[in-house]
Amino acid sequence: MKKFTKTVAAVLTGAMCLGLAACGSADASGAAASGTSSGNASAAASGDVIKVGAIFNVTGDQSSLDTPSQQGFELAVKQINEAGGINGRQVEATYYDGQTDTAVCASNAKKLIDNDGVLAIAGFSDSDFAYAAGAVAQEAGVPIVFSGATTPDIPDVVGNYSFMTAFGDNTCAHAAAEFLYNDLGAKTAYVLTDKSMSYTTNLSDFFMERFEELGGKVVLQDYFSSGDYDYSAQIARYQQQGGADAMFMATGPDDASTVIEQYRSAGIETPMISGDGWDTDIWSVAGDLANDNIYCCTHYSADSDSQAVKDFVASYTEEYGNAPENAFAALGFDAANVIFAAIEACGDDITTDNIRDNLENLKDLECVTGTISYSAESHVPDKTIVVTQAKDGALTFVKNV
Amino acid sequence: MKKTRLIDCNLFRLLCFVIIPLAVLVIFALKPKSYVTGIIITMGIYIVLCASQNLINGFSGMFSMGHAAFMAIGAYISAFFTLSTNVKQSMTPGLPQWLINTQIPFGFALIIGGLAAAIVAVIIGFPVCRTKGHYLSVVTLALVVVVKAVIDNQSDLTNGSRGIAGVPAKSNIVTVYICVVITLFVMYRLLRSAYGRGLIAMRDDPVAAQTLGINLVTKKISCFAISAFFAGVGGGLWGHYLTTISSSNFYFMKSFDIVEISIIGGMFSMSGAIVGSALFTILPEFLAPLEGGLRLGGIKLPTMFGLSNIIMAVILILLIIFRRQGLMGTNEVVLDTWFSKETYLSLFKPEEYRKLANVFRKKEKTD
């Protein structure tokens, strides 16, 4: 047994030595910059390279949202470097995997700021990770732009160094309510909420608020927890209730297809709508049933007429060989461009504080997912929501709300 | 005469396990914002959690997977006592008014969090401790699910699945490592007392233990409660380090992580908790450049995200097959060094120096 421990110890030591050697020869990590920017309120750009960092949860539950986001971000970095960089300086991006774990996200944010000396951080599609990494960035005074997180109070909770690329859940849910009431003529609604996610609980609260303001009536509210794959109880309650004109289903991307399949199989034909959580593969379980009166309020639509969208879809397909999987790819792309626009506005005096100020003064930046502006009162962009309908295996554009 | 090994020399142990770690801690305590400090703090918190897991898994034979539940309770309750009134007013308005207006020092909040977890452990202890082996594991897993469901649904009290952001950042190296030392000291003394021996007897042979007059029920429940107390303290430290807590942080994966650390380090040894936590927190850091795809001698390796998780899992499997007692086995080197007088007194004794010198001599020399 003693011999075994020794071999194990030897193997582990070998692995760690390999890691150390790798540290030495790794490119882009900028280990030389370690420690200099810790605790400083303002870090300056070093020479003619601009360092930015991005943390995306490419492994774990969030990977379906964050992998396209990271690819969108990488595409933007590549495009800007090919165009000559920002004011002549090349952009160097460092990527870390958040592993869908808040502690790892926070620690990676520290690594980016401390070891790699980045000037701005981007990432995340969910508020939990946004809070964790945002707290670190706020304390270190480094601007952080969240690509996919939609909870509207994130900048208030984290602080003035945080910005969101996506619209708030409030804007999205309000748009859904307006679409249902005005366009589909729905006077009554049924709301199904996933109680175990903050994203969905926020969405339904905002939806009900606006729907009732418009004059509609929510006839029944029901709940489930993410991972309950059987909705027969909820379906039974709905049928017993007598139905409604439309349904608002606040579920996350993983439950979307199962919900659609079960409700439609039970013979419920009512139109369903949801937020950007449904901008995912809703045909995986539901198949053709998902092409029947399903709507989704999301960040952009791949077949929209806007030139920015067309260019983005073309370059993404060229780079990765497939069309953007979902709107989060576009959000990652936009987050990068938002940061680059702010850095460009800094001219030659690139410091983290200047970048933050320029972000706050950003007005009307044309992006793939809409026009983005920030102000001192709001770090959440006030964008138009794109309502899409599921048709033949893809989300097609319906209207802007 | 048996040749003395390096590890047996008190001076070497003093250097290796006391002086060097203390130096590292002091250096990083002076650099609170550094990224390495974060790693060290996380390691400390995992040591506390793993030590309490070892108590219940290894030393009492009850294989509990419910640590995440007690962490959640400890985190939320201690946060209730340290959050500012504004945050509580907006996020958790259902709490009683006296609680919303109270803020108490961090240490007391941690203790109250731990006590709350211990009380829950006692309450559910009676049904849980009637089960054994695999059934106990499943029941404790069920506890994790129940706690998460309660937190999610009682949104007035806990802000539901949104979680609470803005927990004051009170975990720094000093507070965390004070907790580590206290936890390990308590565990060390507990295990070397009559209580501890009774616990080990109960693990090895419950029937024989009963014949010797050990009351199994009280032992099981008290052990469960003590383990839950320290898990709650660990959860409180965790919450105050990340400054944001949410029910999804304290779910199965967290429980499995702690069990994994405990098995790899050694379920039957508190020093194993230290070794396991160190491996768990430091290994991903070494592998990070490899994960991101690095240039090794001209060839660019592909990005292999998730590599450190895979390696930890492989280590776990190999250890379970070949060395079930974990890396440290039943060896208590580290704690023996920390908590025995002779280690510290050895600085002043010349025979210790001679012993150390003897180790490096080619031929054996009797004194």
Image (spheres, rainbow, N blue to C red):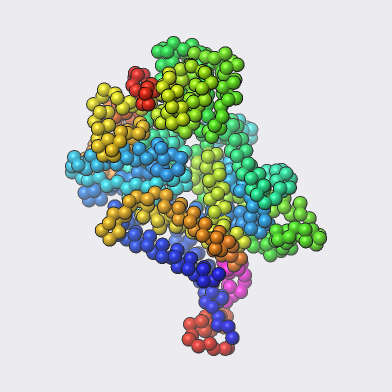
User: Horizontal placement of B266 versus A49: left or right?
Assistant: right
Residue A228 lies within the magenta run: no
Foreground: B231 or B101? B231
Q: Main secondary structure of the magenta part?
A: helix
On the picture, is B207 further left or further right than B266?
right
Is residue A243 shown left or right of residue A19?
right
In this view of the protein, can residue B122 be seen by the observer? no
Q: Is residue A233 visible?
A: yes
Q: What is the quadrant of the N terminus of chain A in the image?
A: bottom right
Point out residue B157 in the picture as x, y percentages from the top left corner: 60, 33
A396 or B173: nearer the eye?
A: A396
In the rendering, at what x and y percent does residue A101 appear?
47, 44
Locate residue B114 relative to residue B278 in the image: left or right: right
Residue at 76% of width from left, 54% of height from top?
B216
Q: Residue at x 22, y 43 (%)?
A: A81
Looking at the image, is A255 positioned above or below residue A305? below
Above or below, A331 against B302 in this view is above
Q: Nearer the viewer, residue A53 or B145?
A: B145
Residue B337 is covered by the magenta coloring: yes
The x, y position of residue A143, in whole percent, is 35, 40
Residue found 49% across the figure and 31% down from its top: A255
**Residues in magenta?**
B332-347
Where's the C terminus of chain A, which quadrant? top left
